[in-house]
Amino acid sequence: MSSRVLVSGPSRSRYVASTTMGDEAAVADPRTVEAVEALARASKALERACGGLSLAHYRVISAVDAGDERASRVAARLALGKPTVSASVEVLYARGLLVRSGVAGDQRAVQLSLSEAGRALLGDARLAMTSVLEELAARTGRRDELVSALSALGSAIEQAAAERRK
């Protein structure tokens, strides 16, 4: 099943979602579409603030920092395929941001941790992204409401991911 959102008219006031699974077309809520577009633009602004660290790589080192010490756990937490995480781990290791070490009793397992450079870059990226979010949130005039809503969205994403893993 694939879907796409078509923008009708120059005012962008009506959005039509169509699917290849049938002839029915549903009208998407314009505010929800605007929210999706805003999140996409915000993610780009956050990535620019990361100082040479892609959001995908930020998510990996952030997961490792949170205690996910194996690539399989990082993949599960981030709802990514193991090959995708393994490729990111290779890049981050080559950049000196991750440290790999063996796991006692399991010759195949590799434990991941942040190097000092990785920890410093993660801290810098978090500060920079927080600054960007604070600036954008202040422009809304509803900073606290927006930050609370985004935090709740993050919790909902974590909950949905946990349910998928079951």
Image: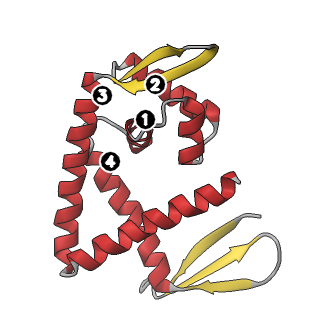
Q: Earlier in the sequence, mark 1 or mark 3?
A: 1
Give the alpha-carbon distance from disc 2 to disc 1, as whole Å.
7 Å
In this orientation, which residue lies closer to the viewer: 59 or 111? Answer: 111
Q: What residue is pinned by disc 1?
A: 64
In this orientation, which residue lies closer to the viewer: 154 or 66? Answer: 66
Does residue 122 appear in this view?
A: yes
What is the crowding at mark 2: few (fewer than 14 residues within 10 Å), some, or many (at least 20)? many
Q: What residue is pinned by disc 3?
A: 118
Whether residues under marks 1 and 3 lie with C-beta atoms below 8 angstroms apart, the answer is yes
Frontmost of labels 2 and 4 is: 2
Q: Tag 2: residue type? A: Leu
Q: Tag 1: residue type? A: Val
Q: What residue is pinned by disc 4?
A: 47
Whether residues under marks 2 and 1 lie with C-beta atoms below 8 angstroms apart, the answer is yes
Report which quarter residue 105 is drawn in. Answer: top right
Q: Tag 3: residue type? A: Gly
Q: What residue is pinned by disc 2?
A: 112
Give the alpha-carbon distance from disc 4 to disc 3, as whole Å.
16 Å
What is the crowding at mark 4: few (fewer than 14 residues within 10 Å), some, or many (at least 20)? some
